[in-house]
Image: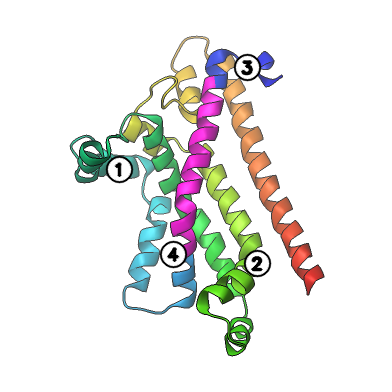
């Protein structure tokens, strides 16, 4: 049904945005949970530096972030050369690089929401479980994780929404290649560069708004549903 309203180029940009958003959020979720837990529950030398590093993509111009990714993961970059030589795949100038850029830009929002969820859990509940003989992993899986699920869902969907809107880092790192790296924001930019491209640009704007609103609404819905479940179980 949706492809009856969108042109093939618009469909391509839409699905590429969804693919890079989903993949980017998926690869950032495990380290995001780990770092959020460390920032919420541990005090150590360098904690402030780690917190600042996590939030750096929020304060740096996205073009700077994209350029740093290009230096690190480009064909001649140390990590990019390693991946290409030993693992047989590249990140620069393809959709996998766009997913990486989306993951990096959405990472601070994801970590922040999950960190706040960890900080809201009463440590006495975890301590009580440990006194009953539960190991650290058992406590995390059976006590902590269910209690932080609303924040986990909210952080995941916020990171995904941010990934969908990513432009500066993506176009700097992987360029503007139709069908490969041209996500919705980049397609919108391209439409504005050609004569009479305003109609296409408006359609991209509508798509972007619908996706962002949908992600935010889903975040709120699932977070509230999980909170009701937790209160009901209690």
The answer for how far apart the CA atoms under marks 3 and 1 are is 32 Å
The crowd level at tag 1 (other Cα within 10 Å; few <14, some 14-19, many 20+) is many
168 left or right of 183 in image: left
Where is residue 51 shown, x and y percent of the image?
40, 65
Look at the numbered discs 4 and 1 and tell me whether their residues touch, using CB distance below 8 Å: no
Mark 4 vs 2, N-terminal side? 4
12 left or right of 222 in image: left
Indicate the quadrant where residue 215 lies. top right
Look at the numbered discs 4 and 2 and tell me whether their residues touch, using CB distance below 8 Å: no
Question: Any mark on residue 35, and which?
Answer: 4
In this rendering, the label closer to the viewer, 4 or 2: 2
Residue 23 falls within the magenta-colored stretch: yes
In this rendering, the label closer to the viewer, 3 or 4: 4
Location of residue 160 with respect to 124 vertically, above or below: above
Residue at numbered disc 3: 6
Question: Any mark on residue 146, and which?
Answer: 2
**Way the structure is coloured:** rainbow
The answer for how far apart the CA atoms under marks 4 and 1 are is 20 Å
Give the quadrant of the N terminus.
Answer: top right
Residue lying at 37% horizontally and 72% vertically, measured from the top left:
47
């Amino acid at each position: 049904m949706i492809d009856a309203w969108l042109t093939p180029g618009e469909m391509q940009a839409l699905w590429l945005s969804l693919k890079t958003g989903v993949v980017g959020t998926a690869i950032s979720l495990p380290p995001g949970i780990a770092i959020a837990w460390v920032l919420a529950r541990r005090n150590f030398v360098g904690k402030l530096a780690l917190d600042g590093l996590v939030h750096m993509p929020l304060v740096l111009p996205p073009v700077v972030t994209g350029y740093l990714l290009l230096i690190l993961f480009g064909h001649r970059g140390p990590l990019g050369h390693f991946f290409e030589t030993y693992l047989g795949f590249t990140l620069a100038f393809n959709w996998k690089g766009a997913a990486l850029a989306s993951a990096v830009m959405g990472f601070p929002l994801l970590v922040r929401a999950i960190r706040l969820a960890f900080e809201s859990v009463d440590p006495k509940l975890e301590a009580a479980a440990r006194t009953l003989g539960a190991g650290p992993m058992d406590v995390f899986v059976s006590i902590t994780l269910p209690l932080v699920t609303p924040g986990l869902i909210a952080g995941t969907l916020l990171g995904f929404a941010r990934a969908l809107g990513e432009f500066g880092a993506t176009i700097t790192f992987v360029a503007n290649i139709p069908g490969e790296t041209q996500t919705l924001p980049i397609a919108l930019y391209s439409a504005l560069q050609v004569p009479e491209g305003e109609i296409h640009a408006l359609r991209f704007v509508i798509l972007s708004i619908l996706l962002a609103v949908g992600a935010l609404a889903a975040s709120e819905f699932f977070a509230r549903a999980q909170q009701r479940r937790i209160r009901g179980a209690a």
